[in-house]
Amino acid sequence: MSIIIKKINNHFIFYDKDIEINIEESFFNGNFATDEALNVQWIHNRRWVKKHYFRKGLMSFLDDKYITKGIKDTRSYKEYFILNYLFKSGFNTCRPIIGWVTYGHIYYTANLVTEALPSITLMKVLQLNTMKDLYWEKIGIEVRKMHDLGIYHGDLNITNIMIDEKKGNIFILDFDKSHFRKIDESVGKSNLKRLKRSLLKNNFFNELDYKKIIDSYSFFKK
């Protein structure tokens, strides 16, 4: 992979060497800066999306602070690495622009900026009742492509699947807590069951629609 890591004061930034943007100049000029009060924000005239990592669950009392680790073991670097790999492999996801980690004495905070996509979430499409059979089939195909590339999604749900209703393209986002692994049939089905639980939880599950995902996943050939 062609990821450059640079130290700037107490920050470590990382980006792909092939990106057409002067990343270091943009970072110095504050083009990626926000108050970091929100998990997700639109920046750069809504052309980019910035994620500031926050803890959830039992560790939420630590807010956005994580115990110091080596740069390649931080949450933003690991997600950047997977996104960059998938994007450069031709997979339908957002292009990562830059990630960075800011170190304190015993903790770090993390950020990631990606390109925005002309799409809305699967949840929103279902709420608007504009879902098409073809979308279900394409979801199965994209999940299969992701698995064929060796990526297990850490939280495959109806807010992390995006649909471009104008062109009919499906995108999969949010690879925090995702990882590389060998994916056989049982592992692949367990990832799809996470999506099923999300549909059930939000009262959008339909057996026939879910079967369209499974069938296209099973019959798609790389």
Image (cartoon, grey):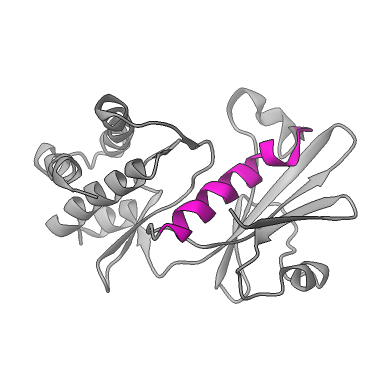
Residue 147 in view: yes
Quick check: 195 above or below 22?
above
Q: Is residue 168 left or right of residue 49?
A: left
Relative placement, left or right, of 178 versus 210 is right
Question: Residue placed at 57% from the left, 48% from the top?
Answer: 81
Q: Position of residue 90 (x, y in %)?
A: 39, 61
Foreground pick, 145 / 49: 145
Magenta segment includes 74: yes
Query: Does residue 132 appear in this view?
Result: no
Please tell me how many numbered marks the rendered image carries.
Answer: 0
Residue 163 is covered by the magenta coloring: no
Q: Nearer the viewer, residue 184 or 13?
A: 184
Name the spot of residue 26 as percent of width and height, x first.
75, 72
Between residue 128 and residue 96, name the one nearer to us.
96
Q: Is residue 222 above or below residue 57?
A: below
Look at the magenta stretch and give its main secondary structure.
helix
Residue drawn at point x = 43 percent, y = 32 percent: 181
Q: Which residues are magenta?
A: 67-89
Which residue sits furthest front?
1
